[in-house]
Image (cartoon, rainbow, N blue to C red):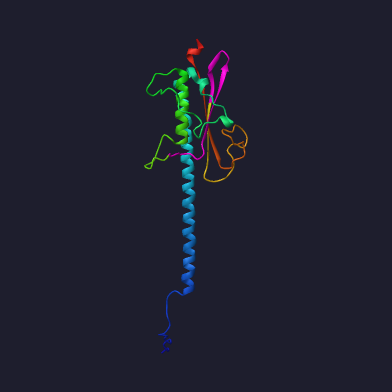
Amino acid sequence: MSAAAPSHPGRQRGFTLIEVMIAVVVLSIGLLGVAALQLTAKKSSHQAWQRAQAVLLADSLLERVRINPSAAAAYHTGTGNSALGGGTLGTPARDCSTQTCTAAQMATWDLWNWERRLDGTAVRDAANRNVSGLVDPHGCVVFTRASVSFPNTGQLRVIVNWRGTTDTSDAVATGTACGPDAAGSVDSRHQVIVNTYVIDERGLG
Protein backbone atom coordinates (compact mmCIF):
# COMPACT_ATOMS: atom_id res chain seq x y z
CA MET A 1 0.00 0.00 0.00
CA SER A 2 1.51 3.26 -1.11
CA ALA A 3 2.04 6.11 1.27
CA ALA A 4 -0.25 9.14 0.95
CA ALA A 5 1.29 12.31 -0.41
CA PRO A 6 2.04 14.88 2.25
CA SER A 7 -0.55 17.61 2.53
CA HIS A 8 0.26 21.32 2.87
CA PRO A 9 -2.83 22.93 4.32
CA GLY A 10 -1.07 26.28 4.72
CA ARG A 11 -0.14 26.72 1.01
CA GLN A 12 -2.19 29.45 -0.78
CA ARG A 13 -3.39 29.04 -4.33
CA GLY A 14 -4.24 31.82 -6.83
CA PHE A 15 -2.50 34.75 -8.61
CA THR A 16 0.61 36.36 -7.24
CA LEU A 17 1.00 40.15 -7.21
CA ILE A 18 3.48 39.96 -10.09
CA GLU A 19 1.02 38.04 -12.26
CA VAL A 20 -1.70 40.60 -11.52
CA MET A 21 0.63 43.47 -12.46
CA ILE A 22 1.58 41.76 -15.71
CA ALA A 23 -2.08 41.24 -16.57
CA VAL A 24 -2.85 44.92 -15.86
CA VAL A 25 0.05 46.06 -18.07
CA VAL A 26 -1.06 43.83 -20.96
CA LEU A 27 -4.65 45.04 -20.60
CA SER A 28 -3.52 48.69 -20.51
CA ILE A 29 -1.47 48.26 -23.69
CA GLY A 30 -4.48 46.72 -25.41
CA LEU A 31 -6.77 49.56 -24.31
CA LEU A 32 -4.25 52.16 -25.51
CA GLY A 33 -4.13 50.42 -28.89
CA VAL A 34 -7.92 50.50 -29.17
CA ALA A 35 -7.99 54.19 -28.21
CA ALA A 36 -5.31 55.03 -30.82
CA LEU A 37 -7.26 53.10 -33.45
CA GLN A 38 -10.44 55.01 -32.62
CA LEU A 39 -8.59 58.34 -32.83
CA THR A 40 -7.15 57.44 -36.23
CA ALA A 41 -10.56 56.35 -37.50
CA LYS A 42 -12.11 59.59 -36.24
CA LYS A 43 -9.45 61.71 -37.97
CA SER A 44 -9.90 59.79 -41.23
CA SER A 45 -13.67 60.16 -41.02
CA HIS A 46 -13.37 63.90 -40.38
CA GLN A 47 -10.99 64.38 -43.31
CA ALA A 48 -13.34 62.45 -45.59
CA TRP A 49 -16.22 64.64 -44.43
CA GLN A 50 -14.20 67.80 -45.10
CA ARG A 51 -13.36 66.60 -48.61
CA ALA A 52 -17.04 65.87 -49.27
CA GLN A 53 -17.90 69.40 -48.08
CA ALA A 54 -15.27 70.90 -50.39
CA VAL A 55 -16.62 68.97 -53.38
CA LEU A 56 -20.18 70.07 -52.58
CA LEU A 57 -19.05 73.69 -52.35
CA ALA A 58 -17.21 73.52 -55.67
CA ASP A 59 -20.14 71.80 -57.39
CA SER A 60 -22.60 74.35 -56.05
CA LEU A 61 -20.73 77.21 -57.73
CA LEU A 62 -20.43 75.27 -60.98
CA GLU A 63 -24.21 74.93 -60.99
CA ARG A 64 -24.65 78.67 -60.39
CA VAL A 65 -22.45 79.42 -63.42
CA ARG A 66 -24.35 76.91 -65.56
CA ILE A 67 -27.58 78.71 -64.63
CA ASN A 68 -26.03 82.07 -65.54
CA PRO A 69 -23.71 81.28 -68.51
CA SER A 70 -24.00 84.70 -70.15
CA ALA A 71 -21.88 86.11 -67.28
CA ALA A 72 -19.47 83.17 -66.92
CA ALA A 73 -16.42 85.43 -67.25
CA ALA A 74 -17.70 87.60 -64.36
CA TYR A 75 -17.22 84.68 -61.94
CA HIS A 76 -13.46 84.64 -62.53
CA THR A 77 -11.53 85.51 -59.35
CA GLY A 78 -8.08 84.23 -60.20
CA THR A 79 -5.75 82.62 -57.68
CA GLY A 80 -3.21 83.81 -55.13
CA ASN A 81 -4.24 86.77 -53.02
CA SER A 82 -7.44 87.22 -55.03
CA ALA A 83 -8.86 83.98 -53.56
CA LEU A 84 -12.17 84.14 -51.75
CA GLY A 85 -12.42 83.31 -48.06
CA GLY A 86 -12.39 85.31 -44.86
CA GLY A 87 -15.03 87.80 -45.92
CA THR A 88 -13.15 89.47 -48.76
CA LEU A 89 -16.36 90.46 -50.57
CA GLY A 90 -18.70 93.17 -49.33
CA THR A 91 -22.47 92.79 -49.38
CA PRO A 92 -23.73 93.35 -52.95
CA ALA A 93 -25.73 96.50 -53.60
CA ARG A 94 -28.59 94.46 -55.05
CA ASP A 95 -30.26 91.53 -53.32
CA CYS A 96 -30.89 89.07 -56.13
CA SER A 97 -32.94 86.80 -53.87
CA THR A 98 -35.72 89.40 -53.73
CA GLN A 99 -34.96 91.68 -56.70
CA THR A 100 -34.52 91.22 -60.42
CA CYS A 101 -30.85 91.28 -61.37
CA THR A 102 -28.83 91.42 -64.54
CA ALA A 103 -26.49 88.52 -65.38
CA ALA A 104 -23.49 90.47 -64.04
CA GLN A 105 -25.32 91.39 -60.83
CA MET A 106 -26.31 87.76 -60.36
CA ALA A 107 -22.66 86.72 -60.69
CA THR A 108 -21.67 89.20 -57.97
CA TRP A 109 -24.49 87.92 -55.75
CA ASP A 110 -23.53 84.28 -56.34
CA LEU A 111 -19.87 84.86 -55.47
CA TRP A 112 -20.78 86.69 -52.27
CA ASN A 113 -23.12 83.93 -51.18
CA TRP A 114 -20.58 81.29 -52.09
CA GLU A 115 -17.88 82.95 -49.99
CA ARG A 116 -20.29 83.06 -47.04
CA ARG A 117 -20.89 79.32 -47.45
CA LEU A 118 -17.15 78.76 -47.75
CA ASP A 119 -16.54 80.67 -44.50
CA GLY A 120 -19.49 79.03 -42.76
CA THR A 121 -21.12 82.37 -41.94
CA ALA A 122 -24.45 81.27 -43.39
CA VAL A 123 -24.77 78.62 -40.65
CA ARG A 124 -24.79 79.51 -36.94
CA ASP A 125 -25.02 77.47 -33.78
CA ALA A 126 -27.25 78.04 -30.75
CA ALA A 127 -24.83 80.69 -29.46
CA ASN A 128 -25.04 82.58 -32.80
CA ARG A 129 -21.43 81.72 -33.66
CA ASN A 130 -20.28 81.06 -37.19
CA VAL A 131 -19.96 77.36 -37.93
CA SER A 132 -17.50 76.48 -40.68
CA GLY A 133 -17.03 72.97 -41.98
CA LEU A 134 -13.53 73.75 -43.31
CA VAL A 135 -10.49 75.16 -41.52
CA ASP A 136 -8.90 78.25 -43.10
CA PRO A 137 -10.71 77.74 -46.43
CA HIS A 138 -9.93 79.54 -49.68
CA GLY A 139 -11.88 79.37 -52.92
CA CYS A 140 -10.80 80.34 -56.43
CA VAL A 141 -12.70 80.49 -59.70
CA VAL A 142 -10.63 80.36 -62.87
CA PHE A 143 -12.43 80.93 -66.18
CA THR A 144 -10.49 80.59 -69.44
CA ARG A 145 -12.49 81.78 -72.43
CA ALA A 146 -12.44 79.77 -75.63
CA SER A 147 -11.75 82.81 -77.81
CA VAL A 148 -12.24 86.56 -77.99
CA SER A 149 -15.35 85.94 -80.08
CA PHE A 150 -16.94 83.85 -77.31
CA PRO A 151 -16.06 85.63 -74.03
CA ASN A 152 -18.43 83.56 -71.87
CA THR A 153 -17.70 80.17 -73.38
CA GLY A 154 -14.72 78.23 -72.08
CA GLN A 155 -13.18 76.14 -69.33
CA LEU A 156 -14.21 76.75 -65.73
CA ARG A 157 -12.22 75.52 -62.73
CA VAL A 158 -13.36 75.86 -59.14
CA ILE A 159 -10.62 75.33 -56.54
CA VAL A 160 -11.20 74.85 -52.82
CA ASN A 161 -8.30 74.73 -50.33
CA TRP A 162 -8.47 74.04 -46.61
CA ARG A 163 -6.22 72.86 -43.78
CA GLY A 164 -6.41 69.34 -42.45
CA THR A 165 -5.98 68.19 -38.86
CA THR A 166 -2.44 66.88 -39.30
CA ASP A 167 0.67 67.78 -41.28
CA THR A 168 1.53 65.34 -44.06
CA SER A 169 2.43 67.02 -47.33
CA ASP A 170 1.05 69.99 -49.21
CA ALA A 171 -1.62 68.97 -51.72
CA VAL A 172 -0.20 71.74 -53.89
CA ALA A 173 3.44 70.68 -53.96
CA THR A 174 3.54 72.00 -57.51
CA GLY A 175 0.71 73.55 -59.45
CA THR A 176 -2.02 76.05 -58.76
CA ALA A 177 -2.15 77.42 -55.21
CA CYS A 178 -5.43 79.05 -54.25
CA GLY A 179 -4.82 81.64 -51.54
CA PRO A 180 -1.88 83.64 -50.20
CA ASP A 181 0.33 80.63 -49.35
CA ALA A 182 2.81 79.49 -51.98
CA ALA A 183 2.68 75.99 -53.42
CA GLY A 184 4.48 73.46 -51.25
CA SER A 185 4.54 75.71 -48.18
CA VAL A 186 1.64 74.28 -46.11
CA ASP A 187 1.98 70.62 -45.15
CA SER A 188 -1.60 70.38 -43.87
CA ARG A 189 -3.22 71.86 -46.99
CA HIS A 190 -5.82 69.84 -48.88
CA GLN A 191 -7.26 70.80 -52.25
CA VAL A 192 -10.18 69.93 -54.48
CA ILE A 193 -10.44 71.07 -58.11
CA VAL A 194 -13.63 70.66 -60.12
CA ASN A 195 -13.56 71.29 -63.88
CA THR A 196 -16.29 71.85 -66.43
CA TYR A 197 -16.85 73.55 -69.77
CA VAL A 198 -19.37 76.36 -69.98
CA ILE A 199 -21.15 77.20 -73.21
CA ASP A 200 -23.02 80.48 -73.56
CA GLU A 201 -25.48 79.56 -76.30
CA ARG A 202 -26.66 83.15 -76.67
CA GLY A 203 -23.10 84.20 -77.43
CA LEU A 204 -22.83 81.64 -80.20
CA GLY A 205 -25.39 83.55 -82.23
x and y, in percent, of residue 95 in the image: 41, 24
In the rendered structure, the answer to whether residue 175 lies left or right of residue 141 reads right
Q: Is residue 56 visible?
A: no
| Span highlighted in magenta in the image | 130-156
Residue ID at (63%, 35%): 174
Q: In which image quadrant can residue 99 be found? A: top left
- The chief SS type of the magenta part is strand
Q: Does the magenta stretch include residue 2?
A: no
- Residue 24 vertical position relative to residue 203 in the rendered view, above or below: below
Q: Which of 23 and 55 is in front in this view?
A: 55
Query: Furthest-top residue in view?
Result: 205
x and y, in percent, of residue 179 in the image: 56, 34
- Residue 201 vertical position relative to residue 133 in the rendered view, above or below: above
Q: Can residue 158 be seen in this view?
A: yes
Figure quadrant of the N terminus: bottom left
- Residue 121 vertical position relative to residue 165 in the rendered view, above or below: above
Q: How many marks?
A: 0
x and y, in percent, of residue 14 in the image: 42, 75
Q: Nearer the viewer, residue 168 or 70?
A: 70
Q: Is residue 134 magenta?
A: yes
Q: Which of 76 and 14 is in front in this view?
A: 76
Residue ID at (56%, 19%): 145
x and y, in percent, of residue 160 in the image: 52, 33
Q: Which of 15 and 104 is in front in this view?
A: 104
